[in-house]
Image: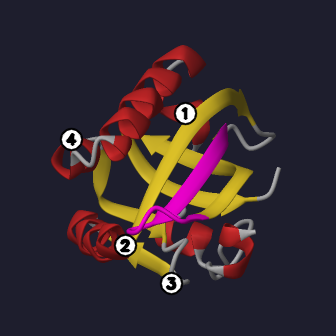
Amino acid sequence: MFYSQHRAYLGDPPEFSAKLGPTAKVGLSDGRTPIEQQTILKKTYAAFNARDVDSVLALMHSEVDWPNGWEGGRVYGREAVREYWTRQWNVLDPHVEPVGFHQDEAGRMVVEVHAIVHDREGKKLADEMIQHVYVIEDGLIRSMEIRKP
């Protein structure tokens, strides 16, 4: 499996709560309904798959905490996400399609994702189901993690 071989962790990163801080709004505490959160995330996936990085970054908090699912570790902030994706897209052609949404026990939005990854020559490297788990704060993506369903 591509993501299980090419990323640092599955599940909550150890620094998750430390990065967000004790007053961070998690899940629905920012007042958005699950449908509103789904709308934000559907726009995010559509823009990512279109390689419209500016539209994706506009949906992220300026200090977003993002997993580096390819090289491992995490990146912090919009510009670090831009740099990571630029490196990734020079080598890989990932397509991530959301197929389901639900909330976890902490109120985070969990997206069931069909991930297909090709190299730049078109060879399929991965075709698997994964989960992306989001914290949305003030209508912007604050963090995401990758985990197995």
Question: In this orientation, which residue lies closer to the viewer: 68 or 11?
Answer: 68
Looking at the image, tell me whether mark 2 or mark 4 is earlier in sequence order: 4
Disc 2 + disc 1, Cβ < 8 Å: no
Between the C-alphas of marks 2 and 4, the distance is 18 Å
Query: What residue did someone put label 1 on?
Result: 29
What quarter of the picture does the N terminus occupy? Answer: bottom right
CA separation, marks 3 and 1?
32 Å
Q: Disc 2 residue type? A: Gln
Displayed quadrant of residue 16: bottom right
70 over 125 or under it: above or below: below
- Quarter of the image holding residue 137? top left
Find disc 3 in the rendering and name its residue: 71
Give the labeled residue for mark 4.
55
Q: Dot 2, how many residues are within 10 Å of its Cα: few (below 14), some (14-19), or many (20+)?
A: some
Q: Position of residue 25 (x, y in %)?
A: 50, 45
Looking at the rendering, the stretch of residues picked out in magenta corresponds to 110-124
